[in-house]
Amino acid sequence: MSPDNRTTGEVILVGGGPGDPDLLTIGGLRALQQADVVLYDHLAPLACLDQTRPGAVLVDVGKIPRGCQTAQADINTLLIEHARTGASVVRFKGGDPFVLGRGSEEWLACAAAGIPVRVIPGVSSAIAGPELAGIPLTHRGITQNFSVVSGHVGPDHPASTVNWDALAQSSGTIVILMGVAHLPEITEGLMARGLNPDLPAAIVVRAATPNQRVVRGTVASLAGLAAEHDVQPPALIVIGAVVGLELGGSE
Ligand code: SAH
């Protein structure tokens, strides 16, 4: 594809962890420090951007829910176009690129365009968020499994591919990302499918940032509490007996 003698660059999908720069991996930091171009969004640990080298091109491709948006197709095109100039391009994302982000779509788009692409895993908010609120996802003698679910559409929405019946019966911990907007629908849907309304539940807001907050309740009370506390994304919901352990994480 190169019309001149420049070599094709590469795209590195870097998982930045949920907000605290300390949760970025050493490999992720190295990729960021060596990048020619960084495409980042609002969920990435933005404080790490000052680690980029002078002259690196930083592009905000933020996808704020119901706010300023860059379409996924445009992000894919930007990654490819920058790499075609020979640049080392970092797609800097919050959490892990392959957990309910759209990193795998970015990978496929680059591969289809003949651009070398690789991923550096990050600490997912699905795990770190509850953990930083003092909630282990499993605990010997209590819970042996957990599920991470997208709540961007609710249980009764035709676009949801989640087996909400199985989830309600699973006896494991349930972690829901992108679920703030549909929280009442989600908790009601789970209870209607047999989930115990008295099961402990929590929302962890802006985990791993100085603004981290935790709202605790039960499956039945959580949606009302979230409205009362004006919970806004990014936030994640954790449901299960482990939420009752209260190990004493920061509130
Ligand atoms: N790939 C990311 C998740 C992307 S989906 C990861 O592994 O973490 C975006 C959702 O992740 C948000 O709607 C929210 O539910 C959750 N999320 C991301 N960062 C968060 C944070 N710092 N605190 C709480 N939830 C967060």
Image (cartoon, grey):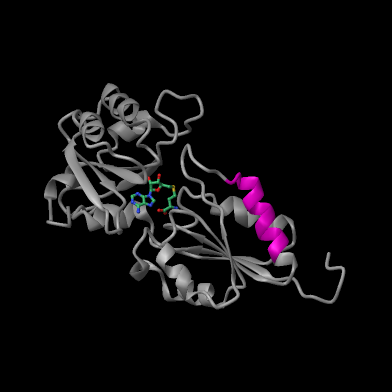
Q: Is residue 101 left or right of residue 7?
A: left
**Residue appearing at x 20%, y 33% in the figure:** 225
> What secondary structure predominates along the stretch shown in magenta?
helix
Q: Position of residue 251 (x, y in %)?
A: 17, 52
- Quadrant placement of the N terminus: bottom right
Please tell me in which quadrant of the rendered image residue 171 appears. Answer: top left
Furthest residue to the right?
Answer: 3
Count of residue discs: 0
Q: Is residue 70 left or right of residue 249?
A: right
Q: Which residues are magenta?
A: 70-82
**Residue appearing at x 60%, y 75% in the figure:** 55
Q: Position of residue 217 (x, y in %)?
A: 16, 37
> Relative to the observer, which residue lies in front, 104 or 56?
56
25 to 184, vertically: above or below: below
**Residue appearing at x 24%, y 57% in the figure:** 131
Q: Is residue 250 left or right of residue 147?
A: left
Please tell me in which quadrant of the rendered image residue 86 appears. Answer: bottom right
Q: Position of residue 111 (x, y in %)?
A: 69, 59
> Relative to the observer, which residue lies in front, 162 or 125?
125
> Relative to the observer, which residue lies in front, 221 or 226?
226
Q: Position of residue 82 (x, y in %)?
A: 69, 64
**Residue appearing at x 45%, y 53% in the figure:** 42
79 to 85, vertically: above or below: above
> Relative to the observer, which residue lies in front, 174 or 80?
80
Magenta region includes residue 242: no
